[in-house]
Amino acid sequence: MGFEYQEGELYCDGLKIKTIADEVQTPFYLYSSEILISTYESYKKAFSKIDTLICYATKANSNLAILNTLAKKGSGIDVVSGGELFKALKAGFPPEKIVFNGNGKTRQELEYALENDLLMINVDSINELFVLNQIASEKTKKAKIAIRVNPDVNPITHHYIATGLAKSKFGVNIHEVKDIYLQASKLENVEIKGIHCHVGSQIIQTNLYGEVLQKVIKLAEELHEIGIIIEYINLGGGLGIRYHDEDVPTIEHLSEIILPYIINTNYKLILEPGRSIVGEAGILVTKINYIKKGFHKYFVIVDAAMNDLIRPAFYKSYHRILPVVEYNMENEGLIADIVGPICEDGDFFARERLLPKPEEGDLLAILDTGAYGFAMSSNYNMRPRIAEVMVSNGKYYIIRQRESYEDLVNKEIIPEGLS
Ligand SMILES: *Cc1c(COP(=O)(O)O)cnc(C)c1O
């Protein structure tokens, strides 16, 4: 299952990737529904001893078919914008399994959330709390909320994705949040349901979750003492995956850290994994167009680019890259930069990577790109966004068509009155 070699050819859930590539053309994202489903089920199983709702973080990959696959398995979902809420509803998630996050929700987004009676809205500041209460009263609704706390812990991850530091823009200082809960408890149109936090992404030290939980449970107990009952503890997402040779905790391991804190309490748990659910379920399939010798090194120039996958340029992240058809191993290897055709020096997928001697026309698979791959793609350099394909039950399906040149212009207008 998943991505594996059989007799020198890379397969996805039993289908030969070369065959799919010949039919849909490169580049494209390819997802394994077997990996997607089994990863979601690992979460369910690991946390089955307590009342847990897994709320997949839409932003990691918001393709409707991916969302629908998870919705059918009973997953909940975390959305961070009106657009994501729209897609979650469209993909079939029931509102009572949707949580709404974000530090800058607009009035329209809050109205949209209230109209749909979501499981809860995670409020990020006292000002948002008052705005939400106001909107809820206009709509004669009660907004179910959690407050996002910033527990001031330091995940060792890229600074762009460390969100639980004191300096971070997210959440309410844990030392001040009690007062906000107290104020919330007095608002007519707000109902307190939980505590939310999310401290970062690509976290590989799981004991961090223990540290956070300790702080959050202490807060919940203090709130209890002043008559505020917390039903849900939401620990956010952030579990890392293995991109290279990192020592990455399993989902099972994560549950072993978390369970002891919750198992003898009445708290229900919410988790919001994004990357760890969908990251390993996707690859980017790309074709080598040219191999060129530069001053000091070789360049393997492929047909995908940083607009399709920005993680290497943005976070300097490492992705394993494999040949889709294993080369003749008698050839010697080639150390090369694997780059795209965009006019930026940051347009690379790997630097000084050893490939078994590649040839023009060969296909490469850039692994672990299911999360924050397509989701962060753009039309930079006027490149139509690439296709997304998913294998399910022995067949492959196009789940997002490759954009056309027409798609690049069809929202743009040359006004009549232009000089
Ligand atoms: C990004 C995000 C997640 C998901 O993070 P992953 O690292 O992909 O698991 C979950 N919750 C919130 C609030 C987020 O911002």
Image (spheres, rainbow, N blue to C red):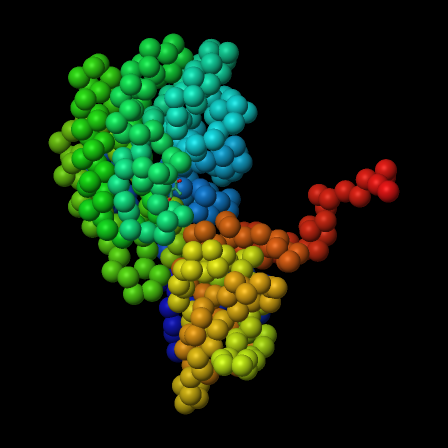
**In this rendering, does residue 412 appear at all?**
yes
- Is residue 36 or residue 174 the one in the foreground? 174
Ligand 1 rendered quadrant: top left
Quarter assignment of residue 333: bottom left
Front in this rendered view, residue 175 or 365: 175
Left or right side of 397 for 14: left
Q: Please name the residue shown 54% across and 25% down the image.
A: 108
In this orientation, which residue lies closer to the viewer: 88 or 152? 152
Which residue occupies 20% across, 30% down? Answer: 217
Which quarter of the rendered picture does the C terminus lie within? top right
Tell me the quarter of the picture where residue 394 sits.
Answer: bottom left
Residue 91 placed where, x, y %? Answer: 49, 39
Q: Is residue 127 left or right of residue 241?
A: right
Q: Position of residue 393 (x, y in %)?
A: 43, 56
- Examine the rendered structure and indicate whether residue 26 appears above or below residue 236: below
- Residue at 23 percent across and 42 percent down: it is 209
The part of the image, by quadrant, that contains residue 172 is: top left
How far across and how far down the image is residue 418, in percent?
A: 84, 41
Q: Position of residue 114 (x, y in %)?
A: 47, 21
Which image quadrant: the N terminus?
bottom left
Q: Is residue 119 visible?
A: no
Q: How many marks?
A: 0
Q: Residue furthest front?
A: 167
Q: What residue lies at 53% left-to-right and 69% top-to-bottom?
A: 339
